[in-house]
Image (cartoon, rainbow, N blue to C red):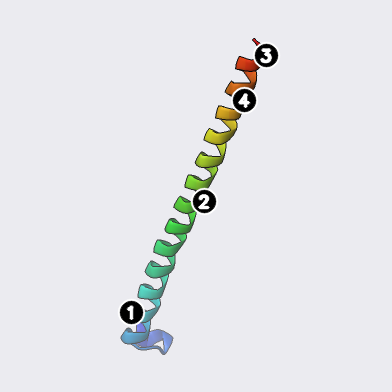
Amino acid sequence: MSSELGITGTQLKTWRLEIEAFGSSEAKRRQKADAAELARLRNENKRLAEEVEILD
């Protein structure tokens, strides 16, 4: 198939590895963003709970 497209098997393998690496780094980026959001929400929840306690 690669010969039909005029590219080498090595080039296809290189592209595949690049795509896999990007997917992995993208997954890590999303995981870090999710962890940061979770930390922010926990802090906000704690602050709101303290406000409720003060108002009671």
Cα gap from disc 4 to disc 1, whole angstroms: 52 Å
Q: Which residue is mark 2?
A: 33
Q: Which residue is mark 3?
A: 55
**Closer to the eye: label 3 or 2:** 3
Q: Which residue is mark 4?
A: 48
Cα gap from disc 4 to disc 3, whole angstroms: 11 Å
Indicate left or right for 33 with 48 as reference.
Answer: left
Q: Looking at the image, is mark 2 or mark 4 earlier in the sequence?
A: 2
Above or below, comparing residue 22 to residue 51 in the picture: below
Q: Residue 5: horizontal and vertical position, in percent?
A: 42, 85
**Closer to the eye: label 4 or 3:** 3
Which of the two residues, 52 or 38, is positioned nearer the viewer here?
52
Q: Looking at the image, is mark 1 or mark 3 earlier in the sequence?
A: 1
Looking at the rendered structure, the secondary structure element under dot 2 is: helix
Q: Which amino acid type is marked by label 1?
A: Lys
Cα gap from disc 3 to disc 2, whole angstroms: 33 Å
Residue lying farthest to the top in this orientation: 56
Cα gap from disc 2 to disc 4, whole angstroms: 22 Å
Q: Which amino acid type is marked by label 4?
A: Leu
Which circle marks residue 13 in the picture?
A: 1
Q: Where is residue 7, by image quadrant?
A: bottom left
Above or below, comparing residue 55 to residue 31 in the picture: above
Q: Residue drawn 51% across and 40% down? A: 38
Looking at the rendered structure, the secondary structure element under dot 1 is: helix
Q: Residue drawn 35% across and 74% down? A: 17
Indicate left or right for 56 with 25 as reference.
Answer: right
